[in-house]
Image (tube, helix red, strand yellow):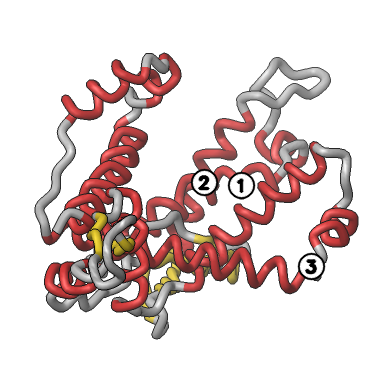
Amino acid sequence: MAKTILARQPDGTIQLTITVDKGLIQKSLSKFLAEAIKEVELPGFRKGKAPKKLAEEKIDKNKIYELIIQELIPEAYLEAVKENQLKPIISPKIELLKTKENEDWEIRATTAEAPKIELKDYRKIVSQALAPAKLWTPEKGDKADSEKKTEATQEEKIQKTIEILLKNFSFSLPQVIVEDELNRSLTNLLNQVNSLGMTVEQYLQSSGKTSSQLREEYQAKIEGELRLLFILSEIANREEIKISDQEIESLAKASGDEKLSQQLSDPLQKEYLKGILARRKALETLASL
């Protein structure tokens, strides 16, 4: 059994320092060495029949340790999550702090839970802010003091609702999530730029921005998107909005997209899509207040 030290940062990031007992490591090492020895071929010996000491000299220990890490680290992490009753929303970032032979191993797993959001009376806040959000235009041919009231479109109400939510509900975002999304977005941008036959320097010059300005711009956009995602997820929970399997299947059939239908056979993909639809429904519900 692994020992765990839990540390929470103010922004909601969680660090788990996990000590894996050397006995578990030795047991795993013996197992993988025995399997590797069966595949060793040495002159004068049949495959897997060479003396253990000679066979071990031919085995790449680094590959053995990679197998040990793949086997023990996920187990130790999941055990630590269960022990501390955590609900991580991202895959952990794993760092090997100590992996000396014949000693306990020490790893650090960095992850995060969904931030806590104080929504207050979100329905009242949104409905009051939306109430005056109507377009007023002078009636042609009438007197100046006569006006015609024009209702905003549903899409305009949705955009206004997004602005209201982001303005009224602030909270700390776990930086590990922001960094992951930022790096992913910048990597996608780099791939797009390369596909156009441009260098990063050429792209920055054409856009009139420095690399720091571009990073700040992307970070601000990502933080806004993440804040909205967490707010709408919480509202969907409060409103008890559930997306059924039937709704997902109907959507896939209506789209006529075979690739989408195949993706939905994966439970994780199905839950991901349910989350998107639940947040959209929560947003439409608020915009219709």
Give SS at disc 2. Answer: helix
* Labels 2 and 3: the sequence-earlier one: 2
Give SS at disc 3. Answer: loop
Contact, mark 1 vs mark 2 (Cβ under 8 Å) = yes
Residue in view at x 56 percent, y 31 percent: 35
Quarter of the figure with residue 42? top right
Q: Which residue is the site of mark 2?
A: 70
Nearest the eye: 261 or 124 = 124
Q: Amino acid at mark 3?
A: Lys
Q: Position of residue 239 (x, y in %)?
A: 11, 56
**Looking at the figure, which quarter contains the C terminus?**
bottom left
Locate residue 232 relative to residue 246 in the image: left or right: right
Q: What is the spatial separation of the Cα atoms under label 2 and label 3, in whole angstroms?
A: 42 Å
**Looking at the figure, which quarter contains the N terminus?**
bottom left
Quarter of the figure with residue 255? top left
Q: Amino acid at mark 2?
A: Gln
* Labels 3 and 1: the sequence-earlier one: 1
Work out whether 30 lies above or below 12.
above
Q: Which residue is the site of mark 3?
A: 209
Q: What is the spatial separation of the Cα atoms under label 3 and label 1, in whole angstroms?
A: 42 Å
Q: Position of residue 95 (x, y in %)?
A: 57, 65
Q: Which residue is the site of mark 1?
A: 66
Q: Position of residue 206 (x, y in %)?
A: 85, 57
Residue 2 seen in render: no
